[in-house]
Structure formats: C-alpha cells, structure tokens
Amino acid sequence: MQKLKLVVVGNGMAGMKVVEELLKIGPDLYEITVFGAEPYPNYNRIMLSPVLAGEQKFEDIILNSLGWYEENGIRLHLGKKVLRIDRQRRIVEAEEGMEVEYDRLLLATGSSPFILPVPGRDLDGVIAYRDIQDTEKMIETAEKHRHAVVIGGGLLGLEAANGLRLRGMDVTVVHLASWLMERQLDRHAGKMLQCELEKRGLKFLLEKKTEALLGNEGRVCGVRFSDGGEIPADLVVMAVGIKPNTQLAESAGIHCNRGIVVDDTMQTFDPKIYAVGECVSHRGTSYGLVAPLFDMAKVCANHLAMMGIGRYAGSFTATKLKVTGIDLFSAGKFEGDEHSEEIVLNDVAGGVYKKITIRDGKIVGTVLYGDTVDGQWYFRMLKEGQDIGEIRGNLMFGQSHLGNAGHEGRVQASSMTDDMEVCGCNGVCKGTITKAIKEKGLFTLEEVRKHTKASSSCGSCTGLVEQILASELGGGYSPKTSAEKPLCACTEHTHADLRKAIREEKLLSIPEVMAFMNWKTQNGCSTCRPALNYYLISTWPHEAMDDPQSRFVNERVHANIQKDGTFSVVPRMYGGITNPEQLRRIADVADKYRVPMVKVTGGQRIDLLGVRREDLPAIWSDLDMPSGYAYGKSIRTVKTCVGTEFCRFGTQDSTGLGIMLEQAFDRMWAPHKVKMAVSGCPRNCAESTIKDVGIIGVESGWEIYVAGNGGIKAEVSQFLAKVKTKEEAMEYSGAFLQLYREEAYYLERTVHWIGRVGLDYARSRVAEDEENRRALYQRLLYALSGERDPWKSVVERERKPLFESLMVEA
Amino acid sequence: MENWIKVCELEDIPQLGARVVKGKSCEIALFREGDRIYALHDKCPHKGGPLSQGIVSKGRVTCPLHGMNIGLEDGRAISPDEGCTETFSVRIEEGAVYISL
Ligand code: SRM
Ligand SMILES: Cc1cc2nc3c(=O)[nH]c(=O)nc-3n(C[C@H](O)[C@H](O)[C@H](O)COP(=O)(O)OP(=O)(O)OC[C@H]3O[C@@H](n4cnc5c(N)ncnc54)[C@H](O)[C@@H]3O)c2cc1C
Ligand code: SF4
Ligand code: FES
C-alpha cells in the first residue's frame, strides 16, 4: 500500500506529540514531513524558565533529537516557515519556494506573544518570552546590563522576572491589575505571592499602564507610564499574553475565530486539515498549557490513524508557578458568586492560605498558597464533579492526614531532599524522579512509572510522585482520573466504556471484545486481558468464557507465587474455625511434602509456604479441604470473633454469621480481593471497621459497615445499614458485593470504588431500594451457583499435566 | 552442530501459555503465541522470577513477580527495563516441538 503524505506545520510540543502518538498506533500509514520555523528540534518549552533561572541547560530540554526524526523516517525542515497553503492542489509552500504535497495536513503553529502597541516597541532590548532565542537574549543581556523591566505580572512574566533576578539584574515587574496573577489568584493569595517575591529582591509597580518605551541610539533606556512616571530599563520583556498563530490558516480560507476552529476530532473546517495546540479554538476556548494540548494530540493521532474513535471534550486546567520555593496552586472558578460558598484557611504567620469554592456540594475552584500538597486531590474531585458532602469537615485538612504506609508518613514532596526515598517498594529516591522528568521529558504519572518504577508497585507513593510532577511541570501536569483514562495502551476505551459494551452488546469472549472495540494489538497485554476476563465473567456468569491465560499466575494455578517461584497453599477454614482432624491432615501434608514453613496468617487460617508447583495437585488431594482463595481477586476470609457462643460480652452469634457468609460467598470473583469480618459486640475484636464488608453485632441486631481497608492506606469503613436478622445481613452484604462486582473497575477495591461513586449511591441501591437489593442478591447467588472448587477440579479432571514439567535428557 | 531434542507435541502447550522443560542444567520455558513457539531460560533477569508463569502477549512475556516485560524472540527486557535472558532455538516438525540446547 502506498503511504499517505502527512505534512506538519509547526515543530513544537503539540505537533510532535501528535507525531509520537501516531507512530505508536499507525507507524506505517504516513510519509511524514515536518516544518519548523525555529532552527531547533522539538524542545520542552515550559523548561525555558528553569533554563533562564540557571537550573538547567538548553541541551537538557530537547524532547526529540535530530536522530529521532531520522530513525522514524521523518523529513524535517528546520528554520523554514510555511507561507501558504493551496487547498485545491493540496500543497504547502514554504520559504525559498519549496513545495510539498499533502493528503493530510496538521497545523500546530502555536501562538505568538502579544506585543503592546506602544511607541518604542521596536527598539533594541525589547523582547518577548517565548522561545530559545528570547531566553538566550535575556541571559546575554543579564551579563552586560543592569535594569530589567518585565511588563505583565502573570505566570510567564513572573517566571521571567525571577530568572532575570537570579541572573543578577535589578528587576521591576509592571502590572496593570491590582494584584499579581489576577486570573489565577484571588487578591489575598496574589498579595502573599508579591510579598514573597519582594523578599527575593523583585520590585513591583501595580496598576500601571505602560505608555511608551524610551530609546537612546536605537536601544531601550526607559519605560514611561500613563501617569507620567518613568523608570530606567536596559531590557524590556513583554509578557502580556499570547495570540494564536492563525494567519496561515486564515489566508487559506480556513474558518478561524481567534483560534483555528476545530471540532471534537481536531478537524478544521477542511476535512483534510487538522489542527492542535495553542493555535486552535475548541468549543470557543484556546488553551495555553501543555496538558490539554497533549489530550488534543492523542485524539488527533487517533483520527489520523483512521481509528475514528476518541473525542476531545475540552479540559479543566490548573496552574502552578515554576519558581523554586514558591508553592502555589490554582484551578477552576475560585472567585465565588452568590450561588457558591467558600471554605477559607488563612494562617498569616505560617504563610499558608487556602480557599476552596463550592457550589451545589461540589468543588468548583481552589486557590492554595504555601501548602499545595492537596492541589491535585482537589483538582481531581473538581474534574470528577465528586460530591464532597461526606468529607466536607475534613476537606481543608487534606487527603493526607490519614497517612500512607511505607514512607514515614511523609506527605509533602517539596520538603524532601533528593536522596530521600519516595517509593518504598522499589527504592526510588526523589532525585531520581526529578532527574528523569527533566532529562527524559516525562509528562505523566505513567511515564514516571515506566522510567523510574516509582509508584508502579503498591501505589502508596502516587500522591508524592504527582506532587513532584506538578512542581516540575507547572500547569503542564494534569492528573487523569480513572474515569477518563483508557484501560491501557492497547485501546482508547475506558473501563466504563468496556463494561458498558460487554453488557449491552452481550460480548462473551476476549477476542469478541477486542474485535468489537477495535483493539490496537492482537492479543492485548498483561494489563487489559485480566481486566477484560473479569468483566466478561462477572457480567455474563455461566455464559462468558473464562480464559486461564488471561489470569495472573496466582489465579491460574490457584496458589500464591513466592519470590523463589514456589507457591503457598492456604486452605479455607470457614470463619477461622478448625478442628483436630483438619489440623492433623495439615500436619501430615507438611511432613510428607517437606513444606518449609507453616504459618498462622493474619486472616485466621494456616498457610503452607514454599510448595513446589508440581506438588500442588497432590497436596490439595491429600488435604481434602476447599481452596482458601488466598491468591485471588475474590473473597479472602471472613474474620470472626467468638461471639455469644463463649464470650461474656457477646450479643450476637458472630462466628455463626461469619461461617454463613464465607460459605455462601465462597468462590466469588471480584474486581479486587474482598475481606470481611463479623464481630459479636462493639468491642470489635474481629476488626470489622477496616474490612470491605464488616459487621458488628449489637443487642438489637447487626450493623453493616462497608468500604474499609487495612492495607496501604488505612481507611475506616462507613455505615451502610442496620438489620435485625442473619438472613438480612446476608442479603445486604451480598447485594453490596454484587453492586461492586457489576460496577467497579478491575483492581479497584471497595474503598476506592466508594470513594469514586459515593456511599450515598451504594446506600440508595442497596439499603433504600428493597427490590433492587433483592435483584442484586439473586444475581450474585445465580453467579455463584454451580461454581466448583478449583483445587478439586484440578485433582479430579485432566488439568494436572499443566502443573508438571516436561523432562528431557540433556 | 545443532542437537535437536523432541520435547512435546505442539498441542501440549496452551495458546498464549507456556510449559516448562526440565533439562539437566536448567529449566526452559516454552511459550506459545499462535503457532510460534519460543524457548527461554525460565529465569527473569530481574530477580529470577519463573517467566513461564507470566502472561504472554505481543511477542513478550510479563514476569509474574514484578511485571518486567521480556521479548520472546531475543530474551531482552523491553525498554525502559534492562536485562537479558538466554534463548534457545526451536523447531516444529509434524506437530512436534524440538529444541536445541
Ligand atoms: C499471608 C498473609 C500474611 C501473613 O502471613 O499473615 C498475607 C500475604 C500477602 N499479602 Fe496481605 N497477607 C495477609 C493479610 C493481609 C491483611 C490483614 C487481614 O486481611 O486481616 C492485610 C490488610 C487488610 C486489607 O487488605 O485491607 C493485607 C494487605 C495486603 C495488601 C494491601 C491491600 C490494599 O488494598 O491496601 C496487598 C497488596 C495487594 O493485594 O495488592 C497484600 C498482598 C499480599 C501478598 C499476596 C503479596 C503478593 O502479591 O504476593 C502476600 C502473599 C505472601 C505469600 O507469598 O504467600 N496484602 N494482607 C496474610 C494472609 C491472610 C489470609 O489468610 O488470607
Ligand atoms: C517560558 C514559558 C514557560 C511556560 N511554562 C509552562 C508551564 O509551566 N506549564 C505549561 O503547561 N505550559 C507552559 N508554557 C506554555 C507551553 O509551553 C505551550 O502551551 C506549548 O508549548 C504550546 O505548544 P504548541 O505546539 O501549541 O506551540 P509551540 O510549542 O509554540 O510550537 C509551535 C511551533 O510552530 C512554529 N511555527 C509557527 N508558525 C509556523 C509556520 N508557518 N511554519 C513553520 N513553523 C511554524 C513555531 O516556530 C513553533 O516552534 C510555557 C511557555 C513559555 C514560553
Ligand atoms: S506478606 Fe504482605 S506485608 Fe509481608 S512482605 Fe508480603 S506483601 Fe508485604
Ligand atoms: S523477577 Fe521478573 S520482574 Fe522481578
């Protein structure tokens, strides 16, 4: 097949992101030609600020080296501006009369700094802050001259001013509004910022309108304001805004309205021409931060690759100033109005100010100064439109006061030194992460995980890694919510899309799902296959195919893999109850197969550790006990206390209910593991309050608690309902678990799922709606009916050979 | 000179699955993807995980212990991971699988 011709105008961050994505999903579709007006390969524009501040070098911020273009067969024309597009002949004309044909054209021309139309703007020493050239000019000027004036007290202006100050200049920031960064900060935070920057030696002139730039022999020497005042200046940096580069598109007759107008697929008015980046206007909005541009790029690449899925629906953006040592975060509509309310914390002495703006029980905006640890958390809730009713009282104190295991309870990345450990599982230090972000040009959590392994195991340090990303990338970092993330790199679809398609289209096998949902890879990967397998068997019990090769090893061999490749065997002891006969069998098995360790687990049962794979079927057969599912995303244990049977305080038969629950829900697959407990009185000896479903007996019945967690992040369970009888307790618990099975995403534990959908939702479906509760419970019982014990089926059927090795004589 | 040894029938290895061959000196994992069979030393370059127990896709296997991806063709870890595990030649003849040690 002949390749189509793709021409890209603009060799910047958005354009090259499209090309990178396209090479991933449709590497052979196009012959690609790129024009860039700047004489450099694609670099990380947002890192110009650290370069100016002397924290990084130009070489460090290159994102795609010249070699990269070559390796991918991309024709690159640097220092060549495209002057004209001939849409009839499908040709672009560049400088020096060069002409190139296209089948698809991508406009990624970015934007240009806005230059105030004042006399003197053409003088030498008057510049904007946009590219490497401007940055070099500033660095050069700082060596020879003294007075710098930055016009514009926004994000860009302040980063420029800070850099020039660090390079030894005497810097004055001139700003029209009455406080700094007025579009991102409220007055209070703006004033705190100004105060801090003044301490660092910057000067500010607020509410000043620039009237003229004064010159001397062609070079700027001063600035005059509308009130008649004048100050000296050897360098004037204009940072008063940007305007999308639309001239090229406009001259070709493509519809523009401040930006190049695109639809949700990033297509312009001419279907052969796409546009992304700062130059576009999408649903009336133009963006000036990289996170939304990257989202656009993904969608655009998908359509260029003719996959035809994916829509860009606009982005929420958040802001962070990249001035080392200043913590500031802003997102959404933080200025309240008559319909909203505010929660404010103002610690003047401590230099901390926080404001959260709320409307209809949801966060609509936030400004944080001095302590921005929870910025990403608030931002995520804002994007998800999460109801904050339940956590309102604790909102201001942040997500962190509960603490995470494994990094000394540390919650603030900025207070960590480079050699401190962020990821306790993989031993990754802060310095390694910042270095990788800078040197490898990483922008997302996934990329950091891939390159450093930080946050890729238990995930408890994710918050810290997100903070580090946010502080390195400024507003360029935008955390993805699980709802908007594709399941993995093999697909564009989210967990929710996939669950829906499997249900509505009645898809019954992994190949069917992959075909129907246009999978990009033939066999998927180790992320999507287990998830799809779970969605299939939970949605269509007894009908969908369970694919052992799409299960993790533990679920495939029904035992837990150990560090040396051996396995552990944990038989069920319903409710933690055993008897001499079982114990004798366990002891015999341990002797016979020389099991290296027999341990009582934290789940009230016994673990045989260090068993060879080949011995598993024989051990199961000798034990003749049911599998304890200690290896599965399934019911683990139901912990119980002694209850009324023996305990002097017991009010209910907790052991009995525990055994009933464990027997009834045994063999239940779930999105993640499920732990339960039943205590006989509020002393709660079975620790019901940190379980997925925890039940506490009281004189008048049973209290049911859900969505607790005792692992990585301890989380106390929440009250779901109170019932009178054991049967009701079974029905409520079962219905709750079935709702979780049907609606949560794979690998989401109950605590995270409830965190996403809200406890009120679960209550309304389980506790308040009797009919629905019954139906859920019936569906669970149907799914579990006829499920066989996995150990028994291996022992009785012909599946044994897979546990045995093949022997050869060499 | 290559010394081919018959180890099993093609059917003995499940689609997208693996079997382990115990040799005198080491254990070899045989992987199947479609009708292609690959043979690798059953030992992850990271911390020695049994690769045969991993999930197979896209010409690679994901180690069951810490999730490193190893290319089935060349035994090399997929970037950004690093490391390499030994590979062996495989031949399929009349539905039987042979390896060369
Ligand atoms: C055997 C046991 C430790 C012990 O010797 O007591 C154990 C062992 C493992 N736990 Fe656990 N956990 C054990 C009780 C617990 C408990 C306590 C409890 O259940 O009362 C917790 C905290 C409660 C909770 O889960 O909320 C616990 C929280 C975890 C976590 C963190 C889960 C979380 O969502 O935060 C993991 C990691 C995971 O599942 O992803 C984990 C994972 C593991 C794994 C499976 C790690 C792995 O993937 O290989 C360990 C298997 C060891 C092995 O080689 O066999 N284990 N683990 C306990 C088995 C109980 C049982 O009878 O089934
Ligand atoms: C100093 C600085 C700091 C920043 N800090 C942050 C931050 O912390 N966080 C954040 O998210 N964002 C930040 N930004 C903004 C971010 O860099 C931009 O949003 C992003 O680079 C825009 O990408 P783009 O591809 O749309 O445009 P650009 O990166 O500007 O790329 C467009 C390219 O097209 C070229 N071009 C234009 N017209 C033509 C033509 N006719 N022919 C050929 N080539 C052409 C231009 O020369 C340019 O190289 C910062 C910007 C600056 C300047
Ligand atoms: S048993 Fe649990 S706590 Fe202990 S090392 Fe394994 S995963 Fe960690
Ligand atoms: S042993 Fe294979 S990834 Fe660690």
Image (spheres, coloured by chain):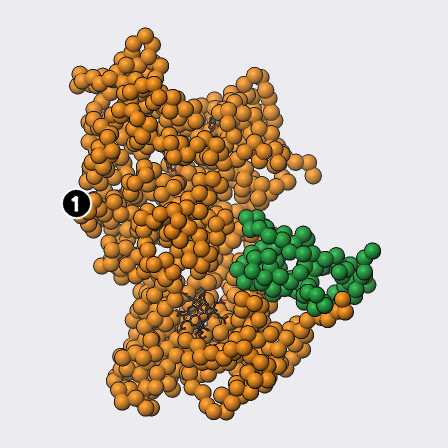
Chain colours: A orange, B green
Q: Can residue A792 be seen in this view?
A: no
The amino acid type, in three-letter code, at marker 1 is Val
Circle 1: is it few (<14), some (14-19), or many (20+) Cα within 10 Å?
A: few
Pick the residue in front: A620 or A695: A620
Q: Residue at x 33, y 62 (%)?
A: A758
Q: Where is residue B48 in the image (x, y as percent from the top left)?
A: 59, 62
Q: Is residue A458 visible?
A: yes
* Secondary structure found at label 1: loop
Chain under disc 1: A
Quadrant holding the C terminus of chain A: bottom right
Q: Compare residues B69 and A168 and report the one nearer the observer.
A: A168
Residue A350 image position (x, y, % from top left)? 19, 47
Quarter of the view holding residue A735: bottom left
Q: In which quarter of the image is residue A578?
A: bottom left
Mark 1 within 8 Å of ligand 2, using the beta carbon: no
Q: Where on the image, by quarter, is ligand 3?
A: bottom left
Q: Position of residue B8 (x, y in %)?
A: 75, 68
Residue of label 1: A348
Report the front residue among A229 and A423.
A423
For residue A751, side relative to residue A509 (left or right): left
**Residue drawn at (37%, 53%), measured in percent from left and top?**
A463
Q: How many numbered marks have been drawn onto this rendered protein structure?
A: 1
Q: Is residue A110 above or below residue A294?
A: above
Residue A185: % across, % down: 25, 39
Residue at screen point 41% across, 83% down: A575
Q: Residue at x 54, y 62 (%)?
A: B65
In which quadrant will I find the N terminus of chain A?
A: top right
Q: In this view, does A148 lie above or below A570?
A: above
